[in-house]
Amino acid sequence: MAKPIKKAVFPVGGLGTRFLPATKAMPKEMLPVVDKPLIQYAVEEAQAAGIEEFIFVTGRGKSAIEDHFDHSFELETLLKERGKIDELEAQKAWIPPAGHTAYTRQQEPLGLGHAVWCARHFIEDEPFAVLLADDLVLSDTPCLAQMVEVHQRTKGNVVAVMDVPREHTSRYGVIDPGAVDGDCVEIRGLVEKPAPEEAPSTLSIIGRYILMPEVFEHLSKGERGASNEIQLTDSMAQMIGHQPFHAHRFEGVRFDCGDKIGFLQANIAFALEREELREGVVSFLKALDL
Ligand code: G1P
């Protein structure tokens, strides 16, 4: 039996310069899609996949994230006094129980691999998940839950992948694919941000990972890769051949919310999913007559 995946790491230390001035005094992970911050979508996706421990790798200026996943005494008292019991319950439902969140600081912006390595003391000898809140997936079954199912079958590392236009490979970790079994693709190699002409395929990693704890042995070496950063992809690549490693072509649509167009598309797509908003959004879009 594969050990259950109970812990997830959320690297949230990034500065979010692409969204200035919005992110000057507010973490980019708190940007809302419709009415919910990006980081809450990621936490709820993790909860839906059975995650019970939430480890945030933060940085300076990120304290709003900690406040967000805590009870707000004033808000809860006010809702109670006004008899808004449904709203009160709805606001409390997604807050992890006491002692189930942990925060550690990345201290230096040395890359995604370094951010995950900063969480090493919170993970024991167990597989764990990593979720990048910038990548938002709209799907019937939450993306991480799909991956947990793959992990239970393959008993190894799993990353979520999608095909991207070849001219975009330099934005992603790209896989060298092996045997294909439905949506599950064996990984023979991994390259971080390859130039289009050098990419082994166009199957690219989006920010969802299930990793075996051995990844920390490789991350601990602190080797620099693309952009002179400590890349998670490089440490993952070193596990290939030693442990099962698969890519999951997830069901769903991924929005790159680290990018303005992706973020705007996510807002429209998620608003269209909401019964109370759908009609208003559709009539606005139709009236645009572009
Ligand atoms: C990171 C990873 C990359 C992955 C991407 C997904 O890159 O390094 O392998 O494909 O996230 O969003 P970043 O977007 O932080 O440059």
Image (cartoon, grey):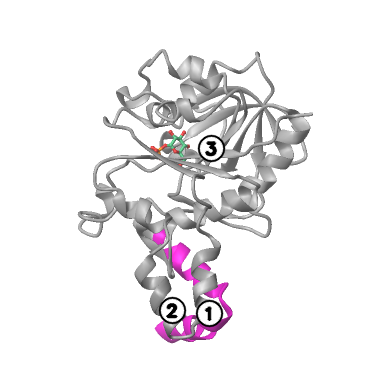
How much space separates mark 3 and mark 2, taking CA atoms?
Answer: 42 Å
Q: Residues within 10 Å of mark 1 (few under 14, many from 20)?
A: few
Q: Residue at x 69, y 22 (%)?
A: 244
- Residues marked 1 and 3 touching at CB (< 8 Å): no
Pointer 3: what residue?
Answer: 205
Q: Is mark 1 on a helix, strand or loop?
A: helix
Q: In this view, does 22 lie above or below 6?
A: below
Identify the residue under disc 1: 85
Q: Disc 2 marks which residue?
A: 79
Residue 260 sits in quarter: bottom left
- Residue 84: % across, % down: 49, 82
Note whether ligand 1 is within 8 Å of mark 3.
yes
N-term-proximal mark, 3 vs 2: 2
Image quadrant in which the C terminus is located: bottom left
Quick check: is the Cβ at mark 2 less than 8 Å away from ligand 1? Answer: no
Callout 2, which amino acid? Answer: Leu
Comparing marks 1 and 3, which lies closer to the viewer?
1
Q: In this view, does 51 lie to the left or right of 168?
A: right
Residue range highlighted in magenta: 263-290
